[in-house]
Amino acid sequence: MAPRRLIEYVVTHELCHTVYPDHSRYFWRLLEKVMPDYERRRQALAINGAKYDQRESR
């Protein structure tokens, strides 16, 4: 249900955790390297993410 760009952000975020299992500056640098516009996507997810949560519709 979520837009592709937000799904791509979540998947990329989780894949970066396979390299850095935390949210250290190294993690964020890696995420930025593979997805330069991650911050814009992250903000969009923070604003709109709840409406895509299947648990919210129950």
Image (cartoon, rainbow, N blue to C red):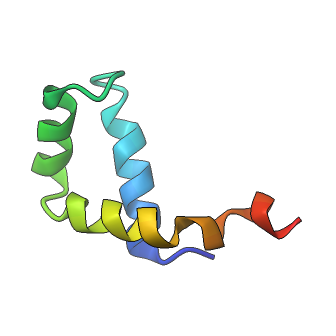
Question: Which residue does the image show at 33% across and 65% down from the upper left?
Answer: 43
Count of marks placed on residues: 0
Question: Which residue does the image show at 44% across and 70% down from the upper left?
Answer: 47
Q: Quadrant of the C terminus?
A: bottom right
Q: Residue furthest right?
A: 58
Left or right: 19 in relation to 8? left
Percent across and percent down for residue 2 are: 55, 74
Question: Which residue does the image show at 43% across and 62% down from the upper left?
Answer: 46
Left or right: 43 in relation to 56? left
Looking at the picture, does residue 20 appear above or below residue 51?
above
Q: Quadrant of residue 18?
A: top left
Q: Residue furthest front?
A: 47
Percent across and percent down for residue 44 are: 37, 71
Q: Quadrant of the N terminus?
A: bottom right
Question: Which residue does the image show at 61% across and 65% down from the upper left?
Answer: 50
Percent across and percent down for residue 49 are: 53, 66
Left or right: 49 in relation to 20? right
Percent across and percent down for residue 26 are: 14, 28
Q: Quadrant of residue 4?
A: bottom left
Left or right: 52 in relation to 37? right
Looking at the picture, does residue 33 appear above or below residue 7?
above
